[in-house]
Structure formats: C-alpha cells, structure tokens
Image (tube, rainbow, N blue to C red):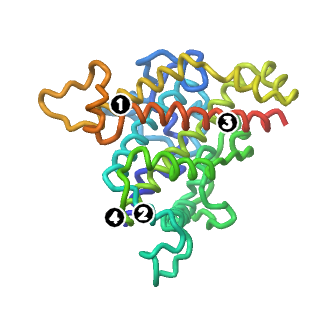
Amino acid sequence: LAVVSAGCEAGVSEATLPSCREGGGREACSTEEESQEGRVDAAHHSQSQPGAQAPPDDSEMAQEWDYLDLGHIRATLIRQEDTILFNLIERAQFKRNLPVYQPGAAFLQGTGIGECYTKHLLGETEAIHAKARRYTSPDEKPFTPKDKLPAPVLPGLEIPENMKYLQSIDVNINHKIYDMYVGTIVPWICKEGDDGQFGSAAVCDILTLQAISKRIHYGTFVAESKFRSQPEEYTKLIKAGDKDGIMKLLTNAKVEELVIKRVQKKATAYGQEITDDSALIGPAVPEEELSNYKVNPTLMGKLYHDIIIPLTKDVEVDYLMQRAE
C-alpha cells in the first residue's frame, strides 16, 4: 500500500502535463526561472471559482495549455522544490540504513531478492506506474530500463504538436541521480547507522528519487523553450558541437543564486518545529543551531548548487545537442 501511495503522491503522467498550468507570468525567463514574482495565470484561477466550467479532457487540455511558457515552467519548478524538501524531511527521520542499498543484504535472506532492496522496490513501483502511463510523459523518466516495464493499460495521452521534440528526444540521467542520491544526499540528511526501518527508508528513497529526477529532467522543457526563443544562436552552437557555449547561453548565475537562497529559506521554515513564537523569516541560521532542523538548510542550498542545478543543465545541453538534428 505504501508503494502505491507513493506513486499517487509523486504524480503519474496524466497529472504531469497539466501541472504546468499552475500560475506564472509570461516574461522572458532564464534556465531556472526569470519571470517576475507573484504573477498568476488568470485562466487557472477562473477554473476554481464557483460556477466555473468542468475541467477539459486530455485532448482539450493538450490544445489549450502552453506547456512551454516559461512562466508555467517556473511555477512548476518552484512547486517541485516543496516536494523535494518534504520528501527529504521524511527520509531524514530514519538513519542511513546502508543495508537497503546493498545487494544480498542479510535482512533479505529468504526473500528471493538478489539486488539491493531500494532498487528492487523502485522497479516494482515503476512497473505499477508504467501501467498508469506515467512514463509516456516527456518529463517522467524511469530508473528501470523501459524495455523491462509493462505497457500502459490506459490509452496514450495526446501530445501537443509543439512538444513533439520533447516526446521524441529521450534524455535520461537517472543512473547519475541514483548514485549521487545514495552516495552524497542520504549521508547529508541522515544520521549514520541502522534503525531497522528498512522498508520505510526505502519507500522514502523512492519518493525522493522520483521527485529529484522529475525536477532535473524538467530541464528539457526549459531547453525547448529557450531554443524556440533563440533558435539561430542555439543552432549555431549545436552544429559547432560547442557544449560549453550552449552551457554559457543557458546559464544565469544571478537567478541560480536566487533559487538557492529560496530553497534555504524554505528548508528553514519547513524543517523546524513551529511554535507560536517561531520566526520563519529572519537572519541566517547560526551554525550551532543547524542541528535543530529536520534537514540542514545550508546543505539544502548545497544540494541545489552542487547537484540539482548542474545536473539540470547537463540535461538541457544533452537535449539541445539532439534538438538540431
């Protein structure tokens, strides 16, 4: 039940494309986000008002919503920050529990499971989600090879014409994400040792891995939108094989710094015990108080600075190198 619930919380593919609807202005944006703060899509709000029309079906939404609008992309990326942080907080309540990452661990004896438990449970979860057509959506990338997953039992979604490249170009760096998660992120957030909560830790791993993967692979949406805004510049760099030039054109260091600071503020707010006199907005957290938080706000900023933002831009470059073809 926990595994199925995890999939619902992470969101399957039919909920993926409409998620771009959630707010956002239409100003020019950068790699991570550059539209102005606080602008909200009026069309989204009108649907929540009394007397509003019923939501359209899949085909109508595919035609109605501009999924490549950078305002919508920005709103989605911001919402994904919350998902990632809350999942990390859930995982941090358990110790590192190294046996869940070790093939043939002692607690698996007699189960018939030869691979590590987290990978096994991840594969089982993705098999369920594949039947719900999760991995037919351009920003959903399985950790399990697609040829090992069952076919969807639901009819395919109608993909808008302006997203055909997103559908046909498959960039998947989940092997890097998994290794970084197990080797770096889990040690950052969890106390060392085993607490015997192997099943709970592995379920939290799955939720967190899927959330981080979705956030990083959403870079293909950003890359496609940026390509359409400057097709001549990007095509020239792509044909020259200039990955460094593409990376430079994609990057906006000022915006990235704003993202990191916002994540640190969210981690400070979400990671503390809230009381009547809690100060959610204030000066930087003193070093001696960081241990009082469910996740270290400084490390959450480091997570974005060292892992999520760089891997997102790697995805964007890999996508664009195939885009001109």
* Secondary element at tag 2: helix
The image quadrant of residue 171 is top right
Mark 2 Cα-neighbour bin, 10 Å: few <14, some 14–19, many ≥20: many
Label 2, on which residue? 3
Task: Indicate which disc residue 314 carries.
Answer: 3
In the displayed structure, would residue 314 be above or below residue 89? above
4 vs 1, front mark = 4
| Coordinates of residue 167 in the picture (x, y in percent) | 69, 45
Q: Amino acid at mark 2?
A: Val
Residue at mark 4 to residue at mark 2: CA–CA distance: 15 Å
For the N terminus, the image quarter is bottom left
Label 4, on which residue? 197
For the C terminus, the image quarter is top right
Q: Amino acid at mark 1?
A: Lys
Label 1, on which residue? 266
Mark 1 Cα-neighbour bin, 10 Å: few <14, some 14–19, many ≥20: many
